Amino acid sequence: MTRKGGKPHKIVMRPSPAAMSAALLAAVVFTVLLEFLVGISFIGQSLWSDPRLFHDHWFTLPLYGWFAVVALAIVALLRILTQCVVLYEDRLKVRGLFRIPRSAKWSALSGIWLVRDIYRGKEPRDPVETEVDAFDAALIMRSQTSRVANLSGAFYGTRAQSILVREAEERGVKVENIDHARPGELARMMPGSLSFIDRHPNLFVLAIVAFYAAHNVLTFMIWGI
């Protein structure tokens, strides 16, 4: 998070070093550890010298799948590493590689909603445990159905959220606090506040598990071990 020299009204906020490190580690896990069977099959059998590789598309299918995983992991990693929220005197802007830039004037915002705890279990966390934590979400909304950005505590941390609130309040933007909310409750309050993955994380995890299971089974069927 930096303030540009000579430009006191331009504040650039980026994901924390911890969030970037976690993203890098996740990329390694998804491209190497979860593709372990593909790796040992390819390297153990020296398949790079097999004449069928890249000529027989069925035989090459496991490798195509790994290429797709690597490409998606690189895109996702660059989206996280390069994303930033820039606060200007009259507006704010969200930018980064592989994402559509978004910009809004402070005066055009309907408000900022700070959600302390987005919970999916039966009960929210104990307030004593959460009061010193960063907010799970800092939703910057242009309207109830149009989100400009979400400065989540997991990615940006407490300091960035505090700066956002300070800058917003100085410009008369409404800031509201929500102690606890389920994803479904936020979706009903503000239909555009959460992405599909935010609303249905279990489906997302299930899709990932299904893909890796199918890819490893397919690799075993075609290449063996």
Image (cartoon, grey):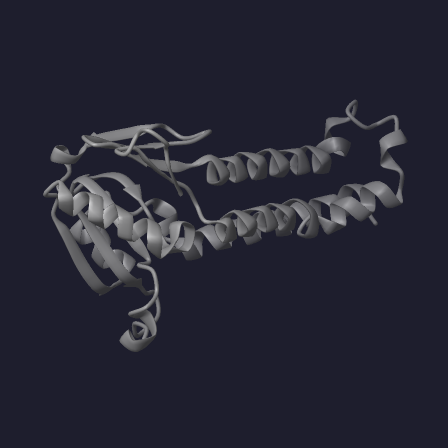
Residue at (41, 30) in percent of width and height: 99
Residue that lies at the very extreme toward the top in this rendered image: 55
**Residue 207 x %, y %:** 50, 49
Q: In which image quadrant can residue 125 be found? A: bottom left
Q: Is residue 71 left or right of residue 43?
A: left
Residue at (69, 52) in percent of width and height: 33
Is residue 222 something that shows in the picture? yes
- Name the one closer to the observer, 188 or 96: 96
**Residue 124 x %, y %:** 30, 72
- Name the one closer to the observer, 53 or 74: 74
Q: Is residue 152 left or right of residue 172?
A: right
In the rendered image of this protein, does residue 55 appear above or below residue 32? above
Residue at (16, 35) in percent of width and height: 106
- Name the one closer to the observer, 112 or 11: 11
Is residue 111 something that shows in the picture? no
Residue that lies at the very extreme toward the front in this rendered image: 6
> Which quadrant: the N terminus?
top left
Residue at (14, 44) in percent of width and height: 170
Q: In which image quadrant can residue 91 be found? A: top left
The count of marks equals: 0
